[in-house]
Amino acid sequence: MMEAYALSDTGCVRPNNEDCHLVAPDVGLYLVADGMGGAAAGEKASRMAVDTVAECIRGAVERDAQALLLAVEEANRRVGGAARGDPALDGMGTTLVAALETGEDVAIASVGDSRAYVFDEGGLRAITQDQTWVNEVGRPLGIDEASLRTHPMRHVLTMAIGASSSLTINYYVVRMSRAALLLLASDGLHGVVDAGKIEGVLRACRNGDPLEAGCRRLIAAARDAGGPDNITVLLARKMG
């Protein structure tokens, strides 16, 4: 079982927060979603996705990796159905990164560009791969990183919950050591705060800082960098 803490912030530019998160240690489930769409559609999409995955996991006979993947697929169906059924919600969708404790392992499913990281003896490493134009088109074309940072397609997702009935879910399995930290975050963090600064905050948590303090320091770092987007961070580690 893991202990976890999550925090979300509107940031310095956006008028509302379209991110959503869930910490449910009773079922070993941890979620971060970053909604998109006009008006309140993004907020609705991220909340619906998080609620659907939680509902499915709580109702699953076996809370395993297969249950997690089925839950994400159900979230896609519900968000997509809501968008098609209401013109005011047209175009809504959300990223989603989900972590589920499955015995000694943690199963991770991701759609879009919200990320999962692990920080352990080997340092900070990204577990998930972004489903974005930059990662799936720009880099394979050989476009240099400096150009990608300002490319007009840099914010374009290639996959999102609710955007299409055809869904590709990236799936990973992580074996976490007792000293390891799991970080789930929307791109309001990793899009503006460099890996070195994130690693410094997580190192302090490994050395005894509370998870809440780590979340607050990560949010503050994103705001200090301009906070152009909503920021959500979730930190978790094994208990005992």
Image (cartoon, grey):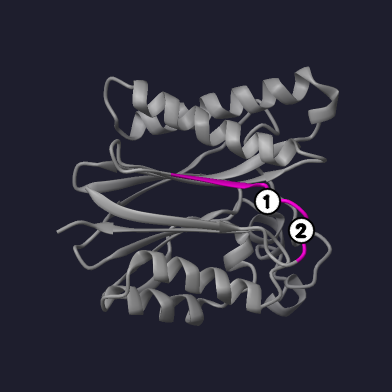
Using the image, determine if residue 32 lies above or below residue 8. Answer: above
Callout 1 environment at 10 Å: few (<14), some (14 to 19), or many (20+)?
A: some
* Predominant SS of the magenta segment: loop
Question: Does residue 15 belong to the magenta stretch?
Answer: yes
**Which residue is under mark 2?**
14
**Which residue is under mark 1?**
17
Range of magenta residues: 13-22
Q: Which residue of the protein is positioned furthest toward the left in this rendering? A: 240
Residue under the point 67% across and 47% down = 18
Residue under the point 14% across and 59% down = 240
Query: Relative to the observer, which residue lies in front, 193 or 147?
Result: 193
Residue under the point 30% across and 36% down = 27
Q: Are discs 1 and 2 less than 8 Å apart at CB?
A: yes
> Which of the 4 image quadrants contains residue 111?
top right
Query: Relative to the observer, which residue lies in front, 107 or 146?
Result: 107
- Residue type at mark 1 is Asn
Q: SS class of the residue under badge 1?
A: loop
